[in-house]
Image: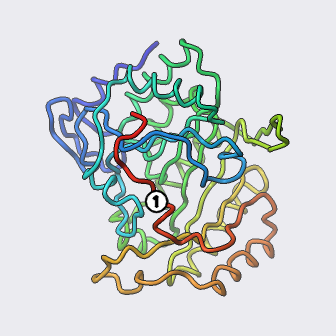
Amino acid sequence: MPVDYRSYMKDCKLCPRNCHVNRLGGQRGYCGQTAELRAGRAGLHFWEEPCISGDKGSGTVFFSGCPLRCVYCQNRCLAESRAGKVLSTERLAEVFLELEEKGANNINLVTPTHFVPQIACALELSKTKGLTIPIVYNTGSYEKVETLRLLNGLVDIYLPDLKYVSEDLAKRYSNAPDYFEVASSAIREMFKQVGKSVFETDASGQELMKKGIIVRHLVLPEGEDDSKKVLAYLHETYEDSIYISIMNQYTPMGHFEAYPELNRKISDEVYDRIVDYALDIGIENGFIQEGDTAKESFIPVFDGSGL
């Protein structure tokens, strides 16, 4: 049965902030969004993990607003709702189909939490109209299990972050001291829905993920000890049933007067130590980044293109 997104908007508690605002009536909670579906860009994206982007790109839709709004966010103007174009659920369904027509390997939903009911409607509609490629849910993992269950059977690949174990770091950078408790429960539900990874090789020989979960971890300046705790937790909990992506692309955005420790990139030495640690504890299914990925040029322009 189609999701009635309006019922979720009248008293919004989709994310752990539990704002209880009437988004249908135009009120805005922590995410900064009303019930109007808003996104900043849709198009082929080539900078995800190789099994997601492949050679043809991931059909990515960047949604406006965010339930976390981390101080170091690379997509800050979008997360803070300073960019975006309003579209209907019917138009979003058309966007999914247009991305498939362009050759996208999958549909990639970026920061979708606060629009889950509308997105579920659009996915159901697009699938009735012939959408066949996998659906990727790309999230910071500050998610409620109840909200994720609206997506059971609609999402094929989960691409969540696990940002912190430390309560202090989560509070300082994301105003979410309960982040680890919330995110670890959310990732458990994601794994329950999609299970172990399934890959297929396309005509060009590229191995693409069709189902499964890749947990991302962005290494932060001064965050080496916590990064190791994140990796240890994931490996102890899931062993080789998930993939882990260790990211070195942290980019200082020049607005960190209150967070001086964030005004620099991570060093190659720190990143190498964290990768070596992952290997030492037995992580085998993973991705690492090489080269200079910490560039603002990797951040898309949120000009409403593709919408």
Where 75 sits versus 52, above or below? below
Q: Residue at x 61, y 73 (%)?
A: 229
Q: Residue at x 65, y 66 (%)?
A: 246
Where 228 sits versus 299, above or below? below
Q: Nearer the viewer, residue 159 or 130?
A: 130
Mark 1 residue element: loop
225 vs 167, left or right, is right
* Residue 132 point in image, percent of width and height: 64, 22
Query: Disc count in the image?
Result: 1
Quarter of the image with the C terminus is top left
Label 1 sits on what residue type?
Ile
* Residue 47 point in image, percent of width and height: 60, 55
218 vs 78, left or right, is right
Where 17 sits versus 226, above or below? above
* Residue 189 point in image, percent of width and height: 57, 42
* Residue 242 point in image, percent of width and height: 72, 51
Q: Which residue is drawn at 55% across and 51% down?
A: 160
Q: Which of 74 and 300 is in front in this view?
A: 300
Where 35 sits versus 223, above or below? above
Q: Which residue is drawn at 52% across and 68% down?
A: 165
Q: How was this image coloured?
A: rainbow
Q: Residue under label 1, please give it.
A: 299
Q: Quadrant of residue 28?
A: top left
83 vs 44, left or right, is left
User: Mark 1 packing: few (<14 Cα in 10 Å), some, or many (20+)?
Assistant: few
